[in-house]
Image (tube, rainbow, N blue to C red):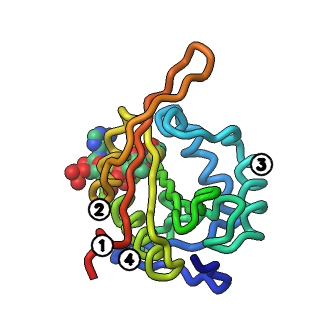
Amino acid sequence: MRVDTEFEPLVTERLLLRRSRPEDAETISAYRSDPEVHRHQGWERTDPEGVRAQIEEMAGRAPGEPGGWVQLSVTERETGRLVGDVGLSPAEGEAGVIKVGYTMAPAFQGRGYATEAVGALVAYAFERLGADVVRAYASADNLPSILVAEKVGMRLVERFEHRYGDEVWFGVRYELRRDQTVG
Ligand SMILES: CC(C)(COP(=O)(O)OP(=O)(O)OC[C@H]1O[C@@H](n2cnc3c(N)ncnc32)[C@H](O)[C@@H]1OP(=O)(O)O)[C@@H](O)C(=O)NCCC(=O)NCCS
């Protein structure tokens, strides 16, 4: 797999995906702190300082580089507004596997933006990074997230449960392999 040290923003019909910057932290913090968004994600901190620190930590990493996530802010091309974020990370100890994650601000959900952004991210992982597999995890009851995975071509490969003390988390793993893509 390649490391992309010269990342160029990804452009789709309506969106532009660029590296997240520290000044995005306030906006990202606002929607991540929404309980409906937060309950599906594993973030420890959603306050602006925490989000900013995370962005600064990721700034030193290139897409495809092992060791953690690289986050892209999703902006509307027409207005420049930040509407969500996506991220990618090589799976630890599994050569050729790229994990993706995605979040849209509630005010911008239901417009097909996540599908459009994640579709571009998946294409980028295969074409530019040379990934063999693109993977997404979701809660088993997170229908919008599962629909996004399916709409970009991923297929269910595993259902699993994690126990945290008395709590059980039911998860699903979706994947798309390079040899399942067309062209
Ligand atoms: C998952 C998420 C990114 C989807 O974003 P989005 O921009 O609304 O997604 P899209 O508009 O591309 O819609 C994808 C599909 O989900 C459906 N959908 C969107 N919101 C929905 C909702 N609240 N309930 C049911 N279906 C929904 C859409 O109708 C669409 O399906 P369709 O094309 O068959 O109609 C967004 O809901 C989100 O950020 N949720 C909270 C964080 C999260 O769960 N992230 C993923 C963690 S794995």
Quadrant including the C terminus: bottom left
The amino acid type found where label 3 is placed reads Glu
Mark 2 CB within 8 Å of ligand 1: no
Q: Earlier in the sequence, mark 3 or mark 4?
A: 4
Position of 114 compared to 93: left or right? left
Q: Position of residue 24 (x, y in %)?
A: 65, 61
- Please tell me the numbered disc located at residue 153: 2
CA distance separating discs 3 and 1: 40 Å
- Please tell me the numbered disc located at residue 8: none
The amino acid type found where label 1 is placed reads Thr
Q: Secondary structure at mark 3?
A: helix
Which residue lies at the image location 60% right of the left edge and 22% below the top edge?
Answer: 164
Q: Are marks 1 and 2 in contact (CB under 8 Å)?
A: yes
CA distance separating discs 2 and 4: 17 Å
CA distance separating discs 3 and 2: 36 Å
CA distance separating discs 4 and 1: 19 Å
Please tell me which residue lies in front, 59 or 16.
59
Q: Earlier in the sequence, mark 3 or mark 2?
A: 3
Eye-nearest disc, 4 or 1 = 1
Relative vertical location of residue 135 with respect to residue 44 in this rendering, above or below? below
- Please tell me the numbered disc located at residue 49: 3
- Please tell me the numbered disc located at residue 12: 4
Eye-nearest disc, 3 or 2 = 2
Please tell me which residue lies in front, 17 or 147.
147
Q: Earlier in the sequence, mark 3 or mark 1?
A: 3
